[in-house]
Image (spheres, rainbow, N blue to C red):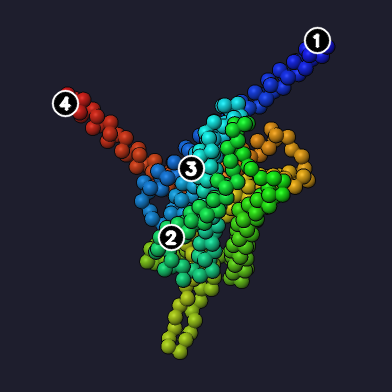
């Protein structure tokens, strides 16, 4: 009997050690993600604000960075706190519901802004002339609409999540059937519908570029005499004769705008790659199709904020000139600051 107890004690201690090691790995991983989210998105905001260009693309990217910051603060930070407290939550019911709501606002806000940005790029290609008037307007209203949609979608979080005082955890209070209905709704609204919209947007964009490129013998660059910039003709660039006279329909798009389309496309690919494992695996698990250990489930849930890490990296990769201008401004200011300090010290 004593030997059996010793074996059980040894097994329990070994299990605890393994759990502690795994918890430490997850803690380090979440802390690393949080650092990347904060540094990356704050850097994007500082660079865009300092650059001073109030383009529609910059408005979308700023709001996307804010959404990613909310995701980091209200999704990753609570995970870190729970891991530090041995997988227990001591915040009470109010904080439980608040973190679920604001975390969902960040996650859903990021999704809706990516969709709005893709629709904006699609309109740019479909109606180049009509979009000239739109380009002069701010994208703040579409972004406000995105935040309103995200705020409405996030209401479900505080409703279904409750603080369990027995196990000291913020958990879902749903039975099996309710959980299936809830997650299936989230799966369709948050993942399937945005993915379908994004797929349609970029399928149309790709088809238009391919069709015109094939018909015109390739996308040709031409010089704009008024601005001196090169433009790429994407649609019909010909003269249409009318009874009232000859009117030129010059439907062109600049190289910088083509670059923003490419950047948005990469953001969409990152969205799908980061969300697909989380959504698909959890859906299959809830319906009992697959069985996953608790440790694997924690790791997969931790992959969700990767989208908030990747977005600023994509912006930095496609906006090297903006970051270079910011670095040059910062470099010019530093010697001035040092000279001023030296002068003040010399007067003292």
Q: Residue placed farthest to the top in the image? A: 2
Sequence-wise first label, 3 or 4: 3
Q: What is the CA distance from the residue labelled 2 to the residue labelled 4?
A: 52 Å
Residue labelled with disc 2: 141
Name the mark on residue 347: 4
Q: Using the image, tell me which numbered label, if any, was put on residue 69.
A: 3
How far is mark 4 from mark 1, CA to CA? 82 Å
Q: Is residue 258 visible?
A: no
- What residue appears at the point 75 percent right and 47 percent down from the top-left corner? 287
Where is residue 331 shown, x and y percent of the image? Answer: 35, 38
Residue 240 can be seen, yes or no: yes
Residue 312 left/right relative to 286: left
The foreground one among 18 and 151 is: 151
Q: Earlier in the sequence, mark 3 or mark 1?
A: 1
Earlier residue among tags 2 and 1: 1
State left or right for residue 138 relative to residue 183: left
Q: Nearer the viewer, mark 2 or mark 4?
A: 2
| Residue 107: image location, x then y, percent | 55, 47
Q: CA distance from mark 3 to mark 2?
A: 21 Å
Residue 122: x %, y % from top left: 54, 64
Helix or strand or loop: what does disc 3 sit on?
helix
The answer to whether mark 4 and mark 1 are in CB contact below 8 A is no
Report crowding for label 4: few under 14, some 14 to 19, many 20 or more residues within 10 A (C-alpha).
few
Viewer-nearest residue: 318 or 54: 54
Pointer 1 residue: 2
């Amino acid at each position: 009997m004593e030997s059996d107890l010793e074996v059980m004690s040894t097994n329990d201690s070994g299990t605890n050690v393994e759990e502690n090691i795994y918890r430490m790995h997850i803690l380090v991983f979440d802390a690393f993600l949080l650092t990347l989210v904060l540094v990356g998105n704050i850097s994007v905001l500082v660079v865009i604000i300092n650059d001073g260009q109030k383009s529609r693309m910059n408005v979308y990217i700023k709001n996307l960075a804010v959404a990613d910051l909310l995701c980091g603060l209200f999704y990753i930070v609570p995970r870190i706190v729970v891991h530090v407290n041995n997988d227990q939550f001591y915040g009470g019911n109010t904080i439980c519901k608040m973190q679920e709501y604001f975390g969902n606002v960040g996650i859903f806000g990021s999704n809706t802004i990516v969709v709005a940005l893709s629709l904006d790029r699609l309109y740019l290609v479909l109606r180049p002339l009509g979009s000239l008037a739109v380009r002069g307007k701010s994208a703040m209203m579409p972004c406000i609409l995105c935040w309103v949609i995200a705020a409405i979608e996030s209401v479900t979080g505080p409703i279904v999540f409750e603080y369990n005082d027995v196990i000291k955890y913020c958990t879902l209070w749903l039975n099996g059937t309710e959980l299936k209905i809830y997650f299936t709704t989230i799966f369709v609204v948050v993942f399937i519908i945005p993915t379908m919209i994004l797929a349609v947007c970029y399928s149309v964009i790709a088809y238009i570029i391919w069709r015109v490129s094939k018909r015109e013998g390739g996308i040709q660059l031409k010089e704009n005499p008024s601005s001196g910039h090169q433009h790429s003709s994407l649609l019909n660039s010909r003269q249409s004769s009318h009874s009232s006279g000859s009117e030129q329909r010059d439907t062109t798009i600049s190289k910088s705008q083509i670059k923003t389309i490419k950047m948005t496309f990469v953001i969409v690919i990152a969205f799908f790659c980061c969300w697909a494992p989380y959504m698909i695996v959890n859906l299959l698990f809830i319906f009992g199709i697959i069985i996953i250990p608790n440790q694997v489930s924690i790791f997969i849930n931790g992959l969700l904020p990767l989208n908030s890490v990747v977005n600023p990296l994509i912006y930095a990769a496609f906006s090297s000139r903006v970051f270079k201008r910011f670095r040059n401004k910062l470099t010019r200011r530093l010697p001035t600051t040092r000279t001023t300090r030296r002068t003040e010290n010399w007067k003292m």
